[in-house]
Image (tube, rainbow, N blue to C red):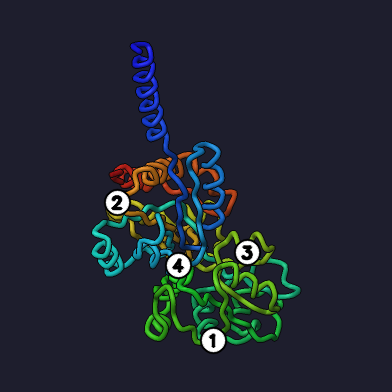
Amino acid sequence: MKFLSVLLISLILLSCGDKKDVSVSKPGGQINGAGATFPYPIYSKWFNEYAKINKDAKINYQSIGSGGGIKQITEGTVDFGASDSPMSDEDIAKANSKNNNKILHIPTVIGSVVLTYNIPGIDKNINLSSDAIAQIYLGKIRKWNDPVIQKENPDTKLPDKEIIVTYRTDGSGTTFVFTDYLGKVSEEWKSKVGVAKDVKFPVGQGGKGNEGVTGLVKQLEYSIGYVELIYALQNNLKYANIKNAEGEYIAPNLESLTKATEQSVNEIPADLRQSITNAKGKGSYPISSYTYILIYENQKDPNKGKVMKEFLEWALGDGEKFAKDLGYAPLPDAVIQKAKSIVTGIKIQ
């Protein structure tokens, strides 16, 4: 009997020990995020690469547009959101009040919005000034061989064809970046159309997501659209050199995106919400932007919170090396250090 009692106690203790071990090694579970299509290519790459390092990192991301990302993180229906346009003070206050929690902006990479086009017979990048872009999207320049565009491209015979304008129909960070740029370079645009994730375009036809606009431009001859660079590259579409604040026609690349941050990196606010469109400085590409992951400061699910915090630390370190191959620029070191300090402040309850 004594032997049986000792055996029973041993089994109970062993059972308790097993339960404790299971609890400690509990995985993070499915982490859901949604938002911007602008960074979707690099986020997909990051989530796949990080899953190789951390088997608990099961991160699902839906590219539904920045407006959708902000809405879902505000409603608490996702674990993180993503947006190219920083949330407004009003949006942040609404989210903080609804959830009694503070939303943090974590910049991830620098991307570019390009003016991509489909002009049969033109096999090189054309030049476009801010004036030409604004007038095209205001419906005032209607043909490709308009004198304003032709003057900027003296060595290219542009066709006497109507320009088919395309734009985003969803609440979009790409639209915000594009209209933020136009609002800085055109008073008429700023007063008549405005700067927002969703505006009423005077002319053209719309598509959903960067994918939708890219599809329209690829399908429609003599069309033009604004998309994130990687979408033009992946679909073998041409894109314009844009005239910057210094009067140079600049193509988006690693160097020109990095230069777009040089004049403002020391002025970035504590919460890291900053516009870098129409940046000053030689060689800077004028339609550049940070893109952000939005996450609550207080993580109520400790397992998911731990995985997301560790993922963000990785993304701001080793993850940055994947940026350039996908058409993005890594963050400047000064911004990485500030972003890491914000990530460090994420609280796991």
- Mark 2 touches mark 4? (CB < 8 Å): no
Task: Name the disc covering residue 147, or none.
Answer: none
User: Which residue is found at the position 50% from the left and 56% from the top?
Assistant: 61
How many angstroms separate mark 2 from mark 4 (CA)? Answer: 22 Å
**What amino acid type is highlighted by mark number 1?**
Val
**What amino acid type is highlighted by mark number 2?**
Glu
In this figure, which residue is indicated by the disc labeled 1? 203
Q: Earlier in the sequence, mark 4 or mark 1?
A: 4
In this figure, which residue is indicated by the disc labeled 4? 173
User: Which residue is found at the position 62% from the left and 64% from the top?
Assistant: 232
How many angstroms separate mark 3 from mark 1 (CA)? Answer: 22 Å
User: Residue 17 location in percent, x, y?
Assistant: 37, 25
Q: Secondary structure at mark 1?
A: loop
Q: Secondary structure at mark 2?
A: loop
**What amino acid type is highlighted by mark number 4?**
Gly
Camera-side mark, 3 or 2: 2
**What amino acid type is highlighted by mark number 3?**
Ala
How many angstroms separate mark 4 from mark 1 (CA)? Answer: 20 Å
Q: Earlier in the sequence, mark 3 or mark 4?
A: 4
269 and 286: which is toward the camera: 269
In this figure, which residue is indicated by the disc labeled 2? 297
349 and 309: which is toward the camera: 349
Q: Secondary structure at mark 4?
A: helix
Camera-side mark, 4 or 1: 4
Q: Earlier in the sequence, mark 2 or mark 1?
A: 1
309 and 147: which is toward the camera: 309
Q: Residue furthest top?
A: 3
